[in-house]
Image: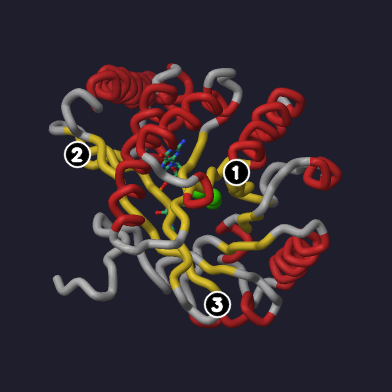
Amino acid sequence: AKKSPSERVQFFASEFGEQVHRRQEMISGLKLAIHNQQLELQFQPQFDRARACTGYEVLLRWYHPVLGSVSPAEFIPLAEQTGLIVSIGDWVLEQALATLKLWVAQGFRGRLAVNVSAMQLHDEAFADRIATLLEQYGVAARYLELEITETALMENVERAMATLNRFRELGLDLAVDDFGTGYSSLAYFKVMPVSRIKIDRSFVSGLPENDQDEVLCRTIINMAHSMGCEVIAEGVETEAQASWLALAGCDELQGYLLGKPALEGFLPENIDI
Ligand code: C2E
Ligand code: CA
Ligand code: CA
Ligand code: CA
């Protein structure tokens, strides 16, 4: 049956009320998530064209006793809006470096890529904190890569450039995440110290049937190479996508086809589990 206008208003009002309630619950939960040990890192492997693992991307997970497992797609934007991302981001970095220290001691020679939000990037103390953490954990900077979205870089180009140059001085690798979604001028990437471009999943998903996505991926790969950057494609789910990308010259692949995010991450070959 059709709802009367007043019923509809009531329906929307309660829907809206629930959303506000969930949001409030998430914000207060997030504030305590570190202290309550509800955060955890997962690791998704990355591969070269010969399908050898070159490293891992760190992906944050949040398990709330009432809300259950909350997706970072939902809680990261909230953490950004409330400024909580700064302390959460610091926690992620510290855990990542503790993990790296362990892995490197066990023979790991790849890289660990950590996602960095706009607010972290534009925090003037950020680069110094990373430098301190690297020293504290005795981890060489070349093992750490920072993934920064194209949109975050473009928010304040001048500020970003200053921080990026500090990263370069420290010897950190930089990847531009979600590339192709930010409508940025390619000219910026000529002057930015970026070592890797990450093709957004939304363009990979259309391969190899969608002609537009094909052109886009090919263009990104060629452009990145001409600027001396490597290219990695995210969200690779099918063999057809993987072989198309390899043929087009894409340097690395990441996605459910080759490995899902998991708790374990690196395990040295000579250790039995
Ligand atoms: P992202 O950086 O673009 O990360 C890739 C997302 O795609 C991850 O979702 C990953 O699990 C998912 N994914 C990987 N392979 C595939 C695939 O083959 N198919 C599909 N459909 N999805 C795939 P996740 O873990 O839910 O993270 C969502 C977003 O949350 C990330 O997107 C990133 O922007 C943010 N995020 C996660 N961890 C952190 C963190 O520690 N710090 C910050 N600032 N953001 C984070
Ligand atoms: Ca990422
Ligand atoms: Ca991405
Ligand atoms: Ca993406």
Q: First in sequence: mark 1 or mark 2?
A: 2
**Mark 1 lies on residue:** 171
x then y, percent, for residue 273: 14, 71
Q: Nearer the viewer, residue 58 or 100?
A: 100
In the visual, does 130 lie left or right of 8? Answer: right
Q: How many marks?
A: 3
SS for tag 3? Answer: helix
Marks 3/1 in contact by CB < 8 Å: the verdict is: no
Hey, what amino acid is under mark 3? Ala
x then y, percent, for residue 200: 60, 55
In the visual, does 187 lie left or right of 183? Answer: right
SS for tag 1? Answer: loop
**Mark 2 lies on residue:** 68
Residue 251 has which mark?
A: none
Q: Residue at x 49, y 65 (%)?
A: 254
**Mark 3 lies on residue:** 242
Mark 1 vs mark 2, foreground winner is: 1
161 to 179, vertically: above or below: above
